[in-house]
Amino acid sequence: MEFTVKQIAVLLGGEIQGSEEDKINKIAKIQEGEAGAISFLANPKYEKFIYETQSSAVLVNKTFVPKKDINTTLIVVEDPYSAFSTLLEEYQRLTSFSKKGIEQPSFIHEKATIGEEEYIGAFAYISENVSIGKNCRIYPQVFIGENVKIGDNVILYPGVKVLQNSVIGNYCTIHAGAVIGSPGFGFAPQKDGTYKDIPQIGNVVLEDHVNIGANTTIDCATTGSTIIESGVKLDNLIQIAHNVTIGKNTVMAAMTGVAGSTEIGENCMIGGQVAISGHGKIPNRTQIAGNSGVRGNFTEEGKTIIGSPAIDMKDFKRIFVVYKKLPDLLRKIQKLEKEYLNSQ
């Protein structure tokens, strides 16, 4: 797939400094550029590479002023990193949505409905009463259970499982191996020490523009819905338990686990390997540092919390200053004890 510099500049709303007819057919890091590639410069520490890169074009900020001669074409934009992201999205859209038609063998129930411009990969299984919108991409070995509703422009990568009654909005992307709607972890302890299974009869709802990483699992609700609101981005290998709600535009890094009935607010940022206990509330714009253990409810919006149990970052820093001094304090205490004993 090939574009001219001019076509890319129009897409990004950029201004060209150099040849607008150069052909671009690949994307590369600025330090690994080659002819036909486009790169970007957002971090000043990489500026040295712009003077030696072999990329045919580089996205730069409007404030960038070269200190040396440059041999590449520049596309000047407001925010190079954001523009590069837009370029990658467009590239993904063009490549992902180039496939069309229904491959065989695959199974589509006679009572399922599929919108136009579809792609159904080989060995996909689409169950009874499934509704799939237009321009969707269902890759090989995807399973879609009964009564699932899927909106427009959705991509389900190989091996995705969307179980019964789940609802997926428009422009969602679910990566390989993810499971949506698996039964929640619900068991009632019995007097004899055994556990009785509690049926999980709710569903999962993904709103629009949700991105789910590879091998992430989202459990269905015991009753009602597990809800992932619009714009949420979940990394690979995340566990979301039953009846959790995740607010709009929240992002969550890999290997995080969220226990049942937790409410997470909007625009939160959650680091990797975070453990969030059940039935708690996390307010809007909360940032949680990686490896933290979150218990109970937090009330103030916009805070950064860290540690296990997680506390406000400011308190953690004060505690950590004391923590680093503990060996010296111990030695002083031991010295005082020795002096006291010798004085008796």
Image (spheres, rainbow, N blue to C red):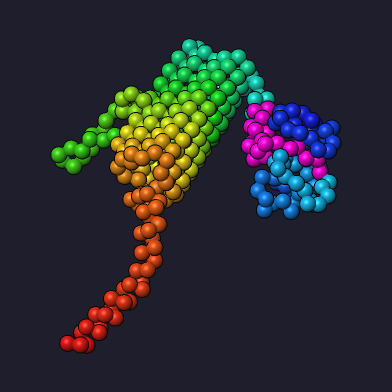
Looking at this view, name the residue that lies furthest to the left: 191
In front: 120, or 64?
Answer: 64
| Quarter where residue 92 is shown | top right
Q: Position of residue 23 (x, y in %)?
A: 81, 34
Across the whole image, how many numbered discs are drawn on residues?
0
Query: Which residue sits at x=49%, y=16%?
Result: 131
Quadrant into which the N terminus falls: top right
Left or right placement of residue 79 versus residue 276 in this view: right
Q: Position of residue 244 (x, y in %)?
A: 36, 32
Left or right placement of residue 292 versus residue 4 in this view: left
Q: Main secondary structure of the magenta part?
A: helix
Left or right placement of residue 73 versus residue 248 in this view: right
In front: 64, or 47?
Answer: 64
Provide the residue span drawn in magenta. Answer: 72-94
Left or right placement of residue 131 versus residue 95 in this view: left
Q: Is residue 171 magenta?
A: no
Quadrant into which the C terminus falls: bottom left
Q: Is residue 86 magenta?
A: yes
* Residue 206 visible from this viewpoint: yes
- Decide: is 344 above or below 218: below
- Decide: is 67 above or below 222: below
Q: Position of residue 18 (x, y in %)?
A: 83, 38
- Decide: is 274 above or below 222: below
| Quarter where residue 229 is shown | top left
Query: Which residue sits at x=35%, y=45%?
Result: 294
* Residue 183 visible from this viewpoint: no
- Decide: is 182 above or below 29: above
Q: Position of residue 148 (x, y in %)?
A: 45, 20
Query: Which residue sits at x=35%, y=50%?
Result: 311
Query: Which residue sits at x=39%, y=39%?
Result: 301
